[in-house]
């Protein structure tokens, strides 16, 4: 090799290496904020060429989750939230999680379906893993929850009402009320916006029945005390009555902090005072612990007698620095 060419090669080599490292660092940063998944169009935006993406796939540093959406190997195990976000990314920059999948994210209706519901603005083919609904979703009918673009709670209810029977719509609305979901665009506002939308009659009828009948769910007294306790001690609020999926089994827990394996069960005689409840609770705790979750049980007396100690322990369990 001529001396001048060798010199250029030596200069270019380290420069390319630094560039690759910077790109890999940016890729890892992007994926770390997205449950370990990235879309091809996002990789191009940060400066990776199509060939560079293919090289990383060939080397096993990326793996395909959906067409044009990849997981970063070694960053994290793909969770349910990661699969949801991957499905949204695979459907384009303006796609949102919707319908049954959105209801599960908002915790207003459990969903054991493997197909993920996504709404897109333009006609797009569905697959066995992603069901794409075509509809315009205005800015005030979409939001981001847990880092996932998703239809708002009122829009999610309206989408479900288009295909589900009235009793399911009523159950979903009762859950929305119980979890005290509030949105800048209310459900009545949405009904006025879409008077001819399929499912509007079901929503109106369900709202009327809920207004006339007794409440379907109430917070337990201990649950009503625990949320103010957390706020008072500057602790993050958990998802209440969250569902944990472990293989083919689903377990509902009192309090779960998303992104952690921390669970708090609020023990009261009304909820756990029967022998069958005691056995099922202990089995559930055993299975959750075997899956890596930490289950902490708290009672009314403990909140009264050990508030500072409980708050300090929760801060350690949740790995908080304040």
Image (tube, helix red, strand yellow):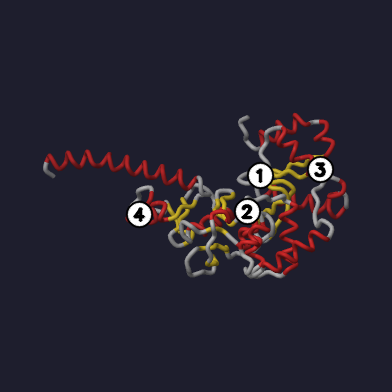
Sequence-wise, the earlier of marks 4 and 2 is 4
Q: How many marks?
A: 4
Quarter of the image where the C terminus is located: top right
Which is more foreground, mark 2 or mark 3? 2
292 sits to left or right of 277: left
Residues tagged 4 and 3 counted as in contact (Cβ below 8 A): no
- Could you tell me which secondary element the residue under label 1 belongs to? loop
Sequence-wise, the earlier of marks 2 and 3 is 2
Residues tagged 4 and 2 counted as in contact (Cβ below 8 A): no
For residue 21, above or below residue 247 = above
At which x and y percent is residue 145?
A: 59, 50
Sequence-wise, the earlier of marks 3 and 1 is 3
Depth order, front residue of 57/157: 157
What residue does disc 2 label? 185
At which x and y percent is residue 171?
A: 75, 61
Camera sees residue 25:
yes
Which is more foreground, mark 4 or mark 3? 3
141 sits to left or right of 266: left
Depth order, front residue of 77/304: 304
- Could you tell me which secondary element the residue under label 3 belongs to? helix
Depth order, front residue of 249/51: 51
Label 2 to label 3: alpha-carbon separation: 31 Å
33 sits to left or right of 22: right
Residue 222 image label: 3
Q: Residue at x 33, y 53 (%)?
A: 49
What residue does disc 1 label? 257
Label 4 to label 3: alpha-carbon separation: 55 Å
At which x and y percent is residue 178?
A: 75, 52
What residue does disc 4 label? 55
For residue 132, above or below residue 7 = below
Quarter of the image where the N terminus is located: top left
């Amino acid at each position: 090799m001529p001396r001048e060419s060798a010199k250029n090669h030596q200069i270019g080599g380290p420069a390319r290496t630094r560039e690759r490292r910077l790109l890999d660092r940016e890729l890892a940063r992007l994926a770390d904020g997205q449950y370990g998944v990235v879309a091809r169009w996002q990789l191009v935006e940060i400066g990776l060429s199509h060939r560079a993406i293919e090289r990383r796939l060939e080397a096993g540093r990326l793996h395909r989750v959906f067409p044009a959406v990849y997981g970063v190997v070694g960053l994290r195990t793909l969770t349910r939230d990661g699969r949801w976000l991957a499905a949204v990314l695979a459907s384009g920059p303006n796609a949102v999680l919707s319908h049954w999948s959105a209801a599960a994210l908002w915790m207003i209706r459990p969903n054991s379906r493997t197909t993920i519901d996504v709404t897109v603005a333009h006609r797009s083919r569905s697959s066995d893993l992603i069901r794409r609904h075509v509809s315009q979703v205005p800015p005030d009918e979409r939001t981001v929850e847990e880092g996932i673009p998703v239809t708002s709670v009122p829009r999610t209810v309206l989408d479900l009402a288009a295909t589900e029977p009235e009793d399911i719509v009523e159950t979903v609305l009762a859950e929305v009320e119980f979890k005290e979901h509030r949105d800048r665009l209310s459900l009545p506002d949405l009904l006025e916006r879409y008077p001819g939308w399929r499912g509007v009659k079901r929503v109106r009828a369900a709202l009327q029945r809920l207004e006339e009948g007794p409440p379907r769910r109430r917070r337990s007294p201990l649950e009503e005390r625990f949320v103010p306790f957390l706020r008072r001690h500057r602790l993050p609020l958990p998802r209440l009555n969250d569902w944990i999926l472990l293989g083919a089994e689903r377990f509902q827990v009192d309090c779960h902090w998303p992104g952690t394996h921390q669970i708090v069960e609020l023990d009261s005689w009304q909820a756990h005072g029967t022998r069958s409840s005691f056995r099922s609770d202990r089995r559930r705790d055993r299975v959750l612990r075997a899956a890596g979750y930490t289950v902490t049980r708290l009672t009314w007396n403990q909140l009264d007698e050990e508030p500072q100690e409980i708050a300090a322990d929760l801060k350690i369990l949740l790995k908080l620095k304040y």
